[in-house]
Image (cartoon, helix red, strand yellow):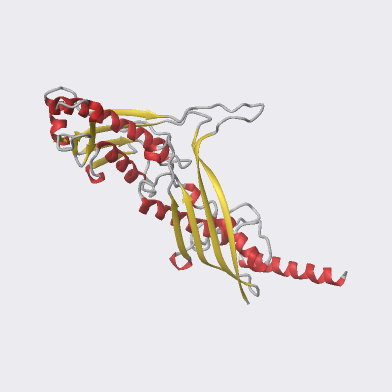
Amino acid sequence: MKRPGRGIACMWYPIGFTVAANPSSAVVKVNEDGTATLLTGTVEVGQGSLTVLGQIAAQELGISADDVHVVSADTDTTPMDTGAIASRTTFVTGNAVRLAAAEAKSILFEVASEMLGVETEELEAADHKIRSKTFPDKQVALAEVAVRAQIVRGRPPLGSASFNPPTVAMDPETGQGKPFATYVYATQIAEVEVDDETGEVEVLRICAAHDSGTTINPALAEGQIEGGIAMGIGMALEEEILFDAEGGQVNPNLTNYLIPTSLDMPKIEVDIVQSYDPVGPFGAKGVGEPTLVPTMPAILNAIYDAVGVRIADLPATAEKILMAIKEKERAEVKQLGSA
């Protein structure tokens, strides 16, 4: 008989470690046609970080993200980056990009101030223009300012910057300190059906609510959450490295190391909770690894809700669940017999 169950799991996850130096750096160059070039050492591995970093530079400069050309991960030409690790890229590298773009923008503002007769503090960059905040009609094309900055003023609009979350050493005796710059939060709810005759689990639906600060690219964030859930389902129910008696791996390929396919995916409902981190670039913190953290415990809690057994050894295969159900039934019979 298939028994329904629901489980919930909540988590917090650290972003931007501070126990040791954790810097990122960036270079932003505004070109004569009003486009920009961003140099960053971060690595794109499918998470969409280069898109987000380009958006951060574009937002600071008041241009379109399509107008930002990102050059990345070439140690011959790009500045250093600690790495695409620990869910730090949006928070740490994003701040370096924003600061570098702001430095390039400050040069443009100095030149635009002379061209418009407006104090730099009264200027803003938006819609590929630099304009007065008080009198928006008083404006000049950003490309025109970039050309004048280079040819007339001899100051090419170029900015470079680095960002390092303030390093706070941990007290070796008390363990007190501030190990991370900020934290993200999430709750996931899993709905499953468990066949109590075979132990087979079907994940029907997962609802995921994630607070990752101000979301710079909602579509990418939602995709990362869905991808993390897919990984979490695999870790919870399928993925397992098996070894023989000599320690050799017996399932070293995808023929018998099982991962979820599109046919295994349940209905996923994503709720991106908007908040604002005062240190993050435009209030952002990041998505990254936290997307899969609550998935496994939510599924295991749902299994317990369905058939009343706790599985603590992943993956929760049908065999393990069925054995736990049988053991539970034997214990119940024994208890009744001794009553």
Instruction: Name the outermost residue toward the top.
Output: 154
Choose top left, top right, bottom left or bottom right for residue 227. bottom left
Q: Which percent across, then down, holds residue 68?
A: 25, 41
Q: Is residue 26 above or below residue 5?
A: above
Q: Is residue 63 visible?
A: yes
Q: Is residue 1 above or below residue 229?
A: below
Q: Is residue 179 left or right of residue 58?
A: right
Q: Which percent across, then down, holds residue 205?
A: 50, 65
**Residue at figure coordinates x 45%, y 61% from the top left:** 269
The quadrant in which the N terminus is found is bottom right
Q: Is residue 250 visible?
A: no
Q: Is residue 115 left or right of residue 172?
A: left
Q: Which percent across, then down, holds residue 73?
A: 34, 38
Q: Is residue 13 above or below residue 175?
A: below
Instruction: Name the outermost residue toward the bottom.
Output: 1
**Residue at figure coordinates x 54%, y 51% from the top left:** 293
Q: Which percent across, then down, holds residue 251?
A: 55, 59
**Residue at figure coordinates x 25%, y 36% from the top left:** 61
**Residue at figure coordinates x 29%, y 33% from the top left:** 101
Front-most of 209 and 161?
Answer: 209
